[in-house]
């Protein structure tokens, strides 16, 4: 069975601090996809990144970066120099092509 | 390009009734997935449709069903509503099947069962 764990339920940081959101996944499949989504207060889920299981390269997009480590089954997300607009619930998710499993989410509050 | 639209946005029903929710995907997208979001269970996958065929199904009872039309619009139906069906129902569309590319989510339909 697939499972996604986001151990941090809530995180509060002050603007301009860096913050890392942890994601640990479980799957028996060798081919799978990992995702991060952002859900701002408006409620609409926003896609951030997709990574397949064969691509362990880390990725950077502006202030966002992702660290994928198959050895520890982790796909962590770092926001550098956080901003108030980053306040949202962030979900990590896993798909094997037959099922799509979300983690419980981490609520990030960035205080001015 | 218009985004994913869901109707209605809000719905109030009573136990035992049935409900139909609608989702219009982004033009050109053939895959539509449905998810249920509740405070207790979080986000859970319901089903995925591609070219009018159900491709995948999550772990929900048979009271939850769906279909997709030739224009890729999708509907989901919940029969014999229970209090626990109160949730935000999200629809997402993508170009390809089985989530191999980006999903675009709609704003959701908030269902309240009294």
Image (tube, coloured by chain):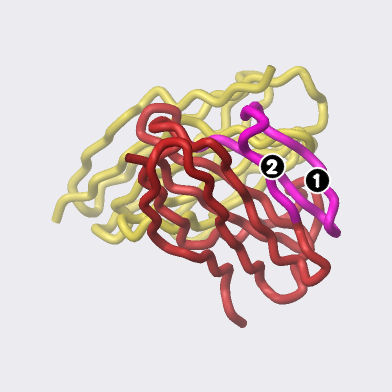
Chain colours: A yellow, B red
Q: Is residue A27 left or right of residue B108?
A: right
Highlighted magenta segment, given as a residue range: B42-67
Q: Is residue A13 left or right of residue B101?
A: left
Is the Cβ of the residue at disc 1 closer than 8 Å to that at disc 2?
yes
Using a 10 Å C-alpha cutoff, classify the residue at mark 2 as few (fewer than 14 neighbours), some (14 to 19) or many (20 or more). Answer: many
Predominant secondary structure, magenta span = strand
Q: Which residue is mark 1?
A: B54
- Where does residue B51 sit, x and y in percent of width and height? 85, 59
Residue nearest the observer in this picture, B51 or A80: B51
The quadrant where residue B62 appears = top right
Secondary structure beneath label 2: strand
Label 2 marks which chain's residue?
Answer: B
Residue nearest the observer in this picture, A54 or B108: B108
Label drawn at residue A83 = none
The residues bearing labels 1 and 2 have C-alpha atoms spaced at a distance of: 7 Å
Which residue is farthest bottom? Answer: B1
Q: Which residue is mark 2?
A: B47
Q: How many marks?
A: 2
């Amino acid at each position: 069975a697939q499972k996604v764990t986001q151990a941090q339920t809530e995180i509060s940081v002050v603007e301009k601090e860096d913050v890392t959101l942890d994601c640990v996944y479980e799957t028996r499949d060798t081919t799978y996809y990992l995702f991060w989504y952002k859900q701002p207060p408006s409620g609409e889920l926003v896609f951030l990144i997709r990574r397949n299981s064969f691509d362990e390269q880390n990725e950077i997009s502006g202030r966002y970066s992702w660290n994928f480590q198959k050895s520890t089954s982790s796909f962590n997300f770092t926001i550098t120099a956080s901003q108030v607009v980053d306040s949202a619930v962030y979900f990590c998710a896993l798909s094997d092509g037959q099922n799509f499993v979300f983690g419980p989410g981490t609520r990030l509050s960035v205080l001015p | 390009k218009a985004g994913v639209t869901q109707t209605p946005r809000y719905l109030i029903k009573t136990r035992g009734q049935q409900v139909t929710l609608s989702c219009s995907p982004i033009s050109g997208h053939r895959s539509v997935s449905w998810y249920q979001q509740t405070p207790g269970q979080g986000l859970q996958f319901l089903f995925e449709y591609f070219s009018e065929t159900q491709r995948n199904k999550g772990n929900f009872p048979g009271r939850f069903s769906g279909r997709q039309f030739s224009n890729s619009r999708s509907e989901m139906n919940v029969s014999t509503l229970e209090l626990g069906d109160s949730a935000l129902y999200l629809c997402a569309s993508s170009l390809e099947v089985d989530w191999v590319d980006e999903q675009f989510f709609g704003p959701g339909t908030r269902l309240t069962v009294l």
